[in-house]
Amino acid sequence: MKLLKFLFSKTFLKQLGLAIIVFLVLLFAFSKWLSSTTNHDDFRDVPNLVGKKMDIVKKLLAERDLVLGEIEYKDYNPKYPKDAVVEQNPKADAKVKARRKIYLTVNKSEYRLIKVPNLINKTKRQAVSTLKAIGFKIGKTTFKPHFAENSVLGLQHNEKKIKKNDKLPYTSTIDLILGDGKLSYSQNNTNENSVTTDTP
């Protein structure tokens, strides 16, 4: 009976009410803290960064309270400006929380260098097919007196002879020096320096 009487006493009810109020205040404060630390319902639209250079990218991200994440560099693509963004993650217009990191893939400022293969004594068809397959362009064709018709005697870039192990930027134009097939094998050595040019 004493316990029952105490549970319904004014003192107990006051203490219970005070405890409930303190609990609710603490619960409200915790909710506010949790909301602020997790940016609950605080989203940003990710800007479209593709095609833009880094100075503009940093400005756009700062305006939206977003953070620049890791940057990966991709082989030069002429469709995009040098040192410009070609891919982004998350994508443009995605909704993310403030301080989210945005990861970028950036266009290199120049083409990568590719080793020119040894094509001496290969046929024109083999040389053209090989060079195009690895990203080079074919320029003019120059014929030189030789017993083997359309056999590759040399390669040039910007009128300079390409030597063994030389590397050129991707999409460079390479000129071919071919045999004209007009000499016999015995005549070949004595006419090595005669050159005629054919229109590419």
Image (spheres, helix red, strand yellow):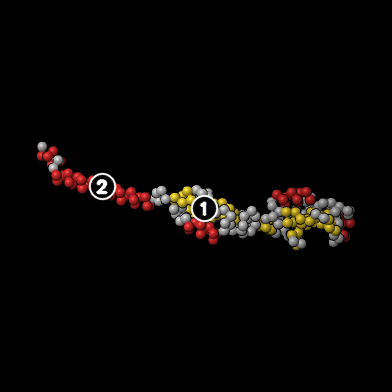
Name the disc covering residue 56, or none.
none
Q: Secondary structure at mark 2?
A: helix
For disc 2, the marked residue is 23
Q: Nearer the viewer, mark 1 or mark 2?
A: 1
Residue at image point 73% right, 54% down: 137
Packing grade of label 2 (10 A; few <14, some 14-19, many >=20) is few
Residue at image point 85% right, 59% down: 195
Q: Quadrant of the N terminus?
A: top left
Packing grade of label 1 (10 A; few <14, some 14-19, many >=20) is some
In the picture, measured across the screen, residue 10 lies left or right of residue 28, that is left
- Please state which of residues 177 and 77 is positioned toward the viewer in this rendering: 77
In the picture, measured across the screen, residue 193 lies left or right of residue 98, that is right
Nearer the N terminus, badge 1 or badge 2?
2
Q: Is residue 3 visible?
A: no
Residue at image point 75% right, 54% down: 138
Residue 69 location in percent, x, y?
49, 55
In the picture, measured across the screen, residue 46 lies left or right of residue 74, that is left
Residue 12 vertical placement versus 168 (above, below) = above
In the picture, measured across the screen, residue 59 lies left or right of residue 36, that is right
Q: Secondary structure at mark 1?
A: loop
Residue 20 location in percent, x, y?
23, 45
Specify the quadrant of the image occupied by residue 183: bottom right
Residue 160 location in percent, x, y?
75, 62
Q: Quadrant of the C terminus?
A: bottom right
Q: CA distance from mark 1 to mark 2?
A: 43 Å
Residue 68 location in percent, x, y?
49, 56
Q: Amino acid at mark 2?
A: Phe
Q: Is residue 188 visible?
A: yes
Residue 36 vertical placement versus 160 (above, below) = above
Q: Amino acid at mark 1?
A: Pro
Name the disc covering residue 47, or none.
1
Residue at image point 83% right, 56% down: 198
